[in-house]
Structure formats: C-alpha cells, structure tokens
Image (tube, rainbow, N blue to C red):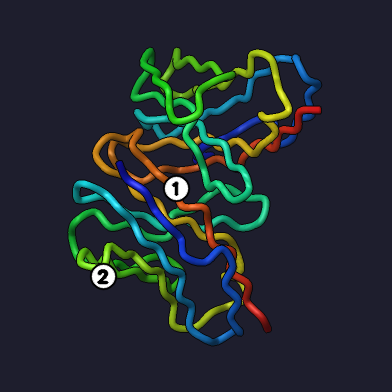
Amino acid sequence: NAGVTQTPKFQVLKTGQSMTLQCAQDMNHEYMSWYRQDPGMGLRLIHYSVGAGITDQGEVPNGYNVSRSTTEDFPLRLLSAAPSQTSVYFCASSPGQSEAFFGQGTRLTVV
Amino acid sequence: AQSVTQLDSHVSVSEGTPVLLRCNYSSSYSPSLFWYVQHPNKGLQLLLKYTSAATLVKGINGFEAEFKKSETSFHLTKPSAHMSDAAEYFCVVRRGGYQKVTFGIGTKLQVIP
C-alpha cells in the first residue's frame, strides 16, 4: 500500500498563478482533508470531504477549491496564488471517525 | 468551542532520560485525543490515541499518555529518550464530527547525546 500520496513535493509559484495540489489514497477511506502547516500555528483545516461528491469548508478555506469525484482523489486548487499561501500542505485520509493518515506534504512558496 | 494547548514549544532532554511533553485541552464534550509525531520534512504519524476507553494509552516506540479528565490533560511520556525521538510532536483534540479537529502548535523535542 502506498497510503496517501501527494504531488508535487515542492512548488514555487508567482503571485496570481493557479495550480492544483494532487492527493491520492489507496486505502478506500471515506474521509479526506487538506491542512496547511505554518510555524507556530499547528495544522489548520482548509477543506474536507466525507465521501465522493461531498466536500465542505474547514477553518481557512479562502483562496482554495476542492472537488471529490472519486474516493481515491482529493485535489486542492489554488485559484490565484498569494504570498500568504506560502506554507506546507498536508493531505490526510481517515476510515470514518478514526485517526488520520497523512501524506508527506507539499512545500509551496509563492513569490 | 474546543482548544488544545501544548505548554512547551521546545523541550530538550539527554539521551536515556525521561521525556514529558505537556498538553491541556478544553472541550465541552468528551473528546478524542491524539498525539502525532513529525520528523523533519516528513508527514505526521500517529503515536497514540484516546477514545474513552482506558485512560492510560500506550503507543508506538515506547510512548504513552494518560488522560486526566479532572486536569483536562493528556501529557505524553517516555521513560528513556532515544536520539531517533528528536522530532516535533502535536497534540490533537477531536470532538464529534471529523471536521471538528484542533491541532496544538507543536512541541519540538531535542535529544542531546
């Protein structure tokens, strides 16, 4: 099992560019989520999904879109990148109301 | 509302000595509590979890944590630190739904040889 796979691992964007962070899991988990990690702030929930076709906003959703067309994939889209979105992004999946399994992270820099 | 407070942003111990990482939480309801570890440039890995069963929870790599409702604490301990324990540790509280998750700001553990 690969677990939770995130791509790319590193990315540099210019302000105003858009991009998609990919997340895939092969554990058939219902729940998937995206977090951002910033120094001194722990992890904050951006968006989450409780199943294919169902998504909802977390604590810090502005500037990000998600969709969940399959159980396996949960991409995160940055519509117009801003320097404030410089962060490390983690995707996680969970088999219901249980602990989360995390990907290795995507380190994003917006210049 | 719920919150989690990790009382130390950095902890430094000598190899072979005990580890104590402190976590206090607040929650209106009985929460689920977790400790995760993050090694440099890696994702988060679950160490242990409390979900209203035994109050003393044993995790991987010799770590354990005790849920103390009266003190609203869930401190992480290990009897003897190893160099490989150097990492950042996150205390997490979840109340009810999957989305109601709050992470602490993390404690960086340094192990001195």
| Residue drawn where x is 44% and y is 16% of the image | A70
Rendered view: B107 above or below B11: above
Q: Quadrant of residue A69?
A: top left
Please state the horizontal and vertical placement of residue B6, each as a whole percent of the image.
46, 60
> Horizontal placement of A9 versus B38: left or right?
right
Q: Secondary structure at mark 1?
A: strand
Rendered view: A73 above or below B96: above
Q: Mark 2 belongs to which subunit?
A: B
Q: Quadrant of the N terminus of chain B?
A: top left
Q: Which residue is mark 2?
A: B56
Say which of B62 and B32 sits in front. Answer: B32
Q: Which residue is mark 1?
A: B103
> Horizontal placement of A105 versus A67: left or right?
right
Q: Hey, what amino acid is under mark 2? A: Leu
| Residue drawn where x is 59% and y is 19% of the image | A63
Say which of B103 and B40 sits in front. Answer: B103
Please state the horizontal and vertical placement of residue B59, each as a whole percent of the image.
37, 65
Mark 2 crowd level (few <14, some 14–19, many ≥20, 10 Å Cα): some
| Residue drawn where x is 71% and y is 23% of the image | A82
Q: Quadrant of residue A6?
A: top right
